[in-house]
Image: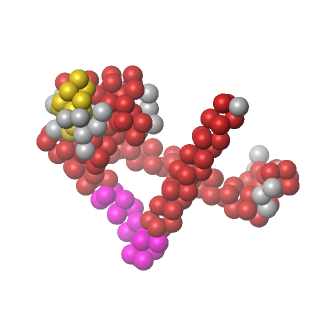
Amino acid sequence: MTAARSRDVTRDHAPACGVPASRLDTADQLTTSLARFMRLIARAKAQLSSGHEGLEHAAFVLVAHLVNEGPRRLTTLAESVLSDPSTVSRQTAGLVRQGLVERQPDPEDGRASLLAATAEGERLYQRARHDRDVYVAQALRHWNQRDIEQFVSLLERLTTDFEAYTHENALAAEHSAAH
C-alpha cells in the first residue's frame, strides 16, 4: 500500500474515532517517521553495544537504571524497565556474577535485598553513555544548537504525553475489568 493510500484509509476512519482527518494525517506521518527512526536506533544500538564488553542490551539497561536511580529492589527494577520480575531476576544474577551489580541488605526490611551497580558497572555505563553521546552528536553535526535543544524539548514532551496516555489507558482497562 502506498503512503498516499495509507493516509486515505486513515482519513476514512476519522469520523468513527472522533479525531479530525488532518490530525490523523499528521499522526500517520509521525508514526511513519518514528518507525524509521526506531529501526535506525536499533542498528545504532547494535553497533554501540559491541563496546559493552559482550553485555546484551537488556542487561545493560538494568545496569543503567541502577546507576541512574540508585539501589532498587528487584520488583521495582522490573517495573522500571517494564519487564517481568523473573526475567530481571535471571539477568541480574548474571550481572552479579560479572561483578557489575551487587546485592545489598535493604535497610527498611532486613529480609529483603537491594540491587546496586558496582563501581565496575558504573564505569561500564559511563563509558557506554559517552560513546552514545559522541555517536548522536556526530549524527547531528549539521544541526544548530537551538534546533537540537528544541527537538529535545519536543521529544521529552512527546515521551511524557505517551507515558501519561499509556498510564490512563492502563487504569481505564483495569477499571473496565473490575466492573
**Rendered image quadrant of residue 80:** top left
In percent of width and height, residue 178 lies at: 66, 30
Left or right of residue 24, residue 79 in this image: left
**Rendered image quadrant of residue 55:** top left
**Rendered image quadrant of residue 103:** top left
Rendered image coloring scheme: secondary structure
Number of marks in picture = 0
Magenta span has 144? Answer: yes
In percent of width and height, residue 165 lies at: 60, 50
Residue shown at 80% from the left, 51% from the top: 17
In percent of width and height, residue 120 lies at: 15, 39
Residue 38 sits above or below residue 72 on the image = below
Residue 65 sits above or below residue 100 on the image = below
- Secondary structure of the magenta portion, mostly? helix
Q: Is residue 100 visible?
A: no
Residue shown at 65% from the left, 37% from the top: 175
Residue 63 sits above or below residue 16 on the image = above
Q: Is residue 6 or residue 91 the one in the foreground? A: 91
Residue shown at 37% from the left, 59% from the top: 136
Q: Is residue 40 visible?
A: yes
Left or right of residue 82, residue 120 in this image: left
Magenta span has 164? Answer: no
Query: Is the C terminus in the top left, top right, bottom left or bottom right quadrant?
Result: top right
Q: Which residues are magenta?
A: 133-150
Q: Is residue 8 or residue 27 the one in the foreground? A: 27
